[in-house]
Image (spheres, rainbow, N blue to C red):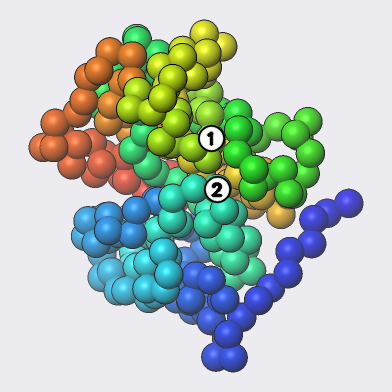
Amino acid sequence: MKFKSSMMTHVDGRMHHIGIRKEHIAENVIITPDPLMIPFYAKFLENAQQMGDYREYVTYTGTYNGKPLSIMSCGFGCMPVAIAIEELHHLDVKQIIRIGENPAIQEHIKVGEICLASGSVRSEGNSKEYIDISYPAIADMDLLFKLMNRQKDLRISIFRSHDVENLDSPYGPNGMERIKKWSKLGVDVFDAETSSMYIVSSCIRNKTASLALIHENYLTNEKLDEDTLNEKREEMFRIAGDVLTM
């Protein structure tokens, strides 16, 4: 049985949470957690215009490679990204790629690498409200292979999406014990959005994939310097933009 998502709007037709209408958004969208990063990414679009700024959702739309493309913040965590995926679905968005900056938990993964989530451990509560834990959180295979073909050196990875960043880090109590547990199980990257995005998009038949720029490695204590961070952010955006406009 296909999951039925309810469409909620304001009286002027804008979506209830993300604050935009259909004419404001392209069919292909890049999302990223931090609304403060949207102006940085929007400068890589041609003729970018701000279409929305409501709650944690900031939206710009323009063109990329001559085709319409939008960049939107989705907020940090699985609840706001689930809202974003559902509401973009009601605006007829077809493909979504998440880009973010996340820590690695394997010693062999270098800072500055870009990882592509083939799937994600469902260590958050949001996706369990949609379907039970036996359902896998996996990327859309079409988008996955397109991203792999566009960028041969992407590291195909298992992510773990969770709700407790302050605990699952070296800076929290018993944080390293928690990290090493998942590292031993073959998890590569910690994030807070991917599993929920994959579950919701699977339920409503949207195509999604998730990229993570490794800005820090929790096991080696390496951190990416600010200049290289911005260079790699642009690279990650262009990988996603090329695939969504091909």
Label 1 secondary element: strand
Label 2 secondary element: helix
- For the residues bearing labels 2 and 1, Cβ distance under 8 angstroms: yes
Q: Write down the residue under mark 2.
A: 78
Residue 10 in percent (x, y) is at 58, 85
Question: Looking at the image, which is closer to me, 71 or 162?
Answer: 162
Residue 59: tell me if it is visible.
no
Q: Residue at x 43, y 36 (%)?
A: 165
Q: Few, some or many C-alpha atoms within 10 Å of disc 1 (few <14, some 14-19, many ≥20)?
A: many
Q: Amino acid at mark 1?
A: Ser
Residue 66 bears which disc, if any?
A: none
Residue 155 position by quadrant: top left
Residue 213: tell me if it is visible.
yes
Q: Residue at x 44, y 50 (%)?
A: 76
Question: Looking at the image, which is closer to me, 169 or 13?
Answer: 169
Question: Looking at the image, which is closer to me, 118 or 246?
Answer: 118
Residue 217 in percent (x, y) is at 31, 21
Q: Residue at x 68, y 73 (%)?
A: 7
Q: Amino acid at mark 2?
A: Cys
Q: Few, some or many C-alpha atoms within 10 Å of disc 2 (few <14, some 14-19, many ≥20)?
A: many
Quote the CA–CA distance across marks 2 and 1: 8 Å
Question: Looking at the image, which is closer to me, 219 or 45?
Answer: 219
Q: Is residue 28 left or right of residue 198?
A: left
Q: Is residue 127 left or right of residue 159?
A: right
| Rendered view: 130 above or below 141 | below
Q: Residue furthest bottom?
A: 11
| Rendered view: 235 above or below 221 | below
- Please tell me which of labels 2 and 1 falls first in the chain: 2
Q: Residue at x 27, y 55 (%)?
A: 37
Residue 161 bears which disc, if any?
A: 1
